[in-house]
Each structure stands twice: as C-alpha cells, then as structure tokens.
Image: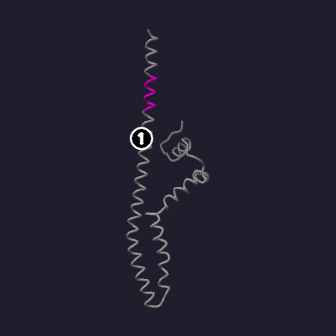
Amino acid sequence: MGFIFSKSMNENMKSQQEFMLMNSRLQLERQLLMQNQMRERQMAMQIAWTREFLKYFGVFFGIAAVGLTAGAIKNKKPRLFLPMIPLSFILAYQYDMGYGTLLQRMKGEAENILDTENTLLEMPKGALTFESIEKARRAQSRFFIEK
C-alpha cells in the first residue's frame, strides 16, 4: 500500500518538476523578448530624435550658411566663412546617424569588439559574485550581527 502511494507521489513530483522547468523556460523567453523589444523601441526613439534634430539643425545650417557667406562677400573677409567647416561636420554626422549607415557601421564595430577584443569588456576585479555582494552588504549594515 505504501509503495503505491510512494510511486504515485514520485510520478506527481516528477511531473511537477517538468512543469516548473517548462514554466521557468517560458518565463525566461518572455523576459528576453520583452528586453529585446524595449531595446528596439529605445533605438527607434534615438533614430527618430536624430532625424528631428537634423531638421532643426539643417534649417540653422542653411540660415548660417547664407548669412556667413553674404557677410564674407559683403565685408570681403573670408574668415567669416570659417564657422561653416565645423558646422558642416556636425550636419554630416547627424545626417549619417539619421539616414546613413552610421548605425550599421557602429553595430559592425561592436560585433568586432565582442568577437576579438572581449577583454576590454571585463569588469574590474571580475564578475560580481554573491560573496562579494554579501561582504559589501555586511560592511555597510549597522544592524547585521555576525554569528
């Protein structure tokens, strides 16, 4: 009689463990998908912000280009045109970020760093461990009583 209950309990426990494993795997997959969607949305917002900034900066650049060019011609001082050089670099960067291939190049470089220069990514003093966190917590805690 006890053997029947024991066998039934073991089967029950095994099916419960399988269910818990499947449930935790499903939860992890959902978390990964959610994190990826959040990352994609943040990137989309960054690109949208860059494109919007580019519109305003483009107008500023156009007005500055016309004004500085007219001033340089009118006053016969070509140095008035010099601010156009750094402004054109900023405009080119913003355009490349919003509509060009800058993000693809950055992604490629990031993949290269992950593949070939991963030592640059290591944390100082190694990865965090439970022991190191617990040691820091004990050092900061006024209420912890060592047994």
Is 72 or 31 nearer to us in this picture? 72
The number of numbered discs placed on residues in the rendered structure image is 1
59 relative to 118, above or below: below
What range of the chain is rendered magenta? 13-22
Is 36 or 133 nearer to us in this picture? 36
Q: Is residue 15 magenta?
A: yes
Of the 4 image quadrants, the one containing the N terminus is: top left
Is 31 or 81 nearer to us in this picture? 81
The residue that appears at 60% across and 54% down in the rendered structure is 120
Where is residue 72 shown, x and y percent of the image? 45, 87
39 relative to 102, above or below: above
The residue that appears at 45% across and 35% down in the rendered structure is 25
| Amino acid, disc 1 | Arg
Mark 1 burial class by Cα count in 10 Å: few <14, some 14-19, many 20+: few
35 relative to 25, above or below: below
Q: What residue would you read off at disc 1?
A: 30
Colour setup of the view: one colour
| Res 49 → quadrant | bottom left
The residue that appears at 43% across and 13% down in the rendered structure is 5
Tag 1, which secondary structure?
helix
